[in-house]
């Protein structure tokens, strides 16, 4: 039996927000939702069940973090807020996980996409009392160093970075590495109310600026869905001209208060191809570090620290149809966020994990 649905009122709201219509499959959505629902609550896994994408931990194509719920005899300290007493959680396939896997050690790991930073923990204290509760853990410093996250390795600042580590920011940084994007779990309803005429305001302002990003200067008249209007103070009902800024999606997500603004790989590559063609990347390290995909910032920092010249962004490997995120033609070296390929035409194409090993 075919059931008719009238979504006209829902589409009125979507149109006010400037939403783009996308095709979808009900079977695909239900399958994804089942996996994601399980990962949000946490799924017990063995190390050999995990995938790695550019060295980042993944499960069935989704970015995850990995932690051990059993905190042993120090459980009471951990539940009381002593993160130094707790076992660290992992976001990458680091030296610690590699050592544990190679030595055959087994612990009960939980894979999750929950980025709240609070974990379901358990343990038995010195008095043999079983304790359970929720607490915070530190991220593994080996993970931070392997990725050179926020230049942790080159600046020897992993311990400082872990103090202020934010999972939502981390997942956002590497969103272009994954086919499936994390589910948004935190919403501030007070800042999410748009004016009734927001669509008209947005279109008028973007058109007045000729569909040009005020951050990097690229023109997006042929890709209007990638050009946003940003509220500087984060309050979406405040449409004063001084509070509005036209930004491409990549520049927009770099603004304060914009965690959870995930940019898929195809959109990031489109924006950076436009930046490349517009001369935004001028051959300097400054332009590369400012505008390159945030997912490769750590790798780029390692290259710069070793005295390499600034790379070309969105470079097509000669003799192939492959475009890599960053390349050093004189070295015949490229970084990709996709699966690395065997050497072609004398080039070496590696992912973030492979590049980290080169720069060790």
Image (cartoon, grey):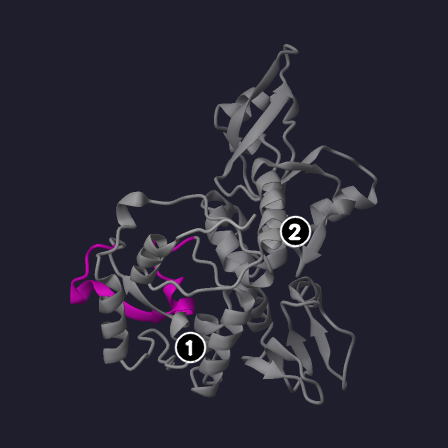
- Considering the image in quadrants, where does the C terminus appear? bottom right
Residue at the spot of label 1: 223
In this rendering, the answer to whether 242 lies above or below 70 is: below
**Res 274 seen here:** yes
> Over which residues does the magenta segment extend?
236-259
Residue at the spot of label 2: 57
Residue drawn at x 78%, y 35% is 106
81, 109: nearer the viewer: 109
Q: Quadrant of residue 146?
A: bottom right
Residue drawn at x 62%, y 52% is 27
Residue 81 percent location from the top left of the image: 48, 28
Residue 39 percent location from the top left of the image: 60, 41
Badge 2: few (under 14), some or many (20 or more) residues near its Cα, within 10 Å? many
Residue 52 colored in magenta in the image: no
Residue 51 percent location from the top left of the image: 71, 53
305, 177: nearer the viewer: 177
């Amino acid at each position: 039996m075919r059931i008719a649905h009238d979504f006209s009122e829902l589409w009125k709201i979507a149109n006010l927000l400037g939403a783009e219509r996308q095709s979808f499959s009900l079977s695909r959505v239900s399958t994804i939702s089942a996996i994601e629902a399980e990962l949000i609550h946490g799924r017990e896994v063995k190390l050999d069940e995990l995938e790695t994408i550019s060295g980042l931990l993944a499960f069935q194509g989704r970015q995850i973090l990995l932690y051990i719920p059993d905190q042993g005899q120090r459980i009471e300290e951990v539940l009381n807020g002593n993160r130094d007493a707790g076992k660290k959680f992992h976001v990458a396939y680091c030296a610690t996980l590699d050592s544990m896997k190679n030595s055959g050690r087994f612990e009960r790991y939980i894979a999750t996409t929950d980025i709240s930073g609070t974990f379901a923990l358990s343990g038995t204290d010195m008095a043999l009392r079983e304790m359970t509760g929720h607490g915070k853990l530190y991220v593994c410093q080996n993970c931070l160093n392997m990725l050179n996250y926020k230049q942790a390795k080159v600046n020897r600042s992993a311990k400082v970075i872990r103090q202020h580590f934010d999972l939502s920011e981390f997942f956002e940084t590497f969103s272009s590495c994954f086919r499936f994007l994390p589910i948004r779990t935190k919403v501030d309803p007070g800042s999410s109310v748009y004016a009734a005429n927001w669509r008209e305001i947005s279109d008028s302002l973007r058109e007045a600026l000729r569909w040009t990003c005020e951050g990097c200067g690229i023109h997006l008249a042929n890709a209007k869905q990638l050009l946003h209007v940003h509220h500087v103070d984060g309050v979406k009902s405040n449409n004063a001209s001084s509070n509005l800024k036209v930004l491409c999606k990549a520049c927009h997500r770099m603004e304060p208060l914009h965690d959870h603004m995930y940019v898929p790989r195809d959109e990031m590559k489109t924006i950076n191809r436009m930046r490349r063609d517009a001369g935004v990347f001028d051959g300097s390290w400054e332009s590369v570090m400012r505008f390159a995909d945030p997912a490769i910032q750590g790798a780029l920092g390692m290259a710069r620290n070793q005295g390499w010249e600034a790379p070309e962004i969105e470079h097509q490997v000669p003799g192939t149809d492959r475009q890599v995120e960053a390349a050093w033609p004189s070295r015949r070296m490229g970084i990709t966020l996709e699966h690395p390929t065997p050497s072609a035409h004398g080039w070496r194409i590696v992912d973030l994990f492979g590049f980290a090993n080169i720069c060790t």
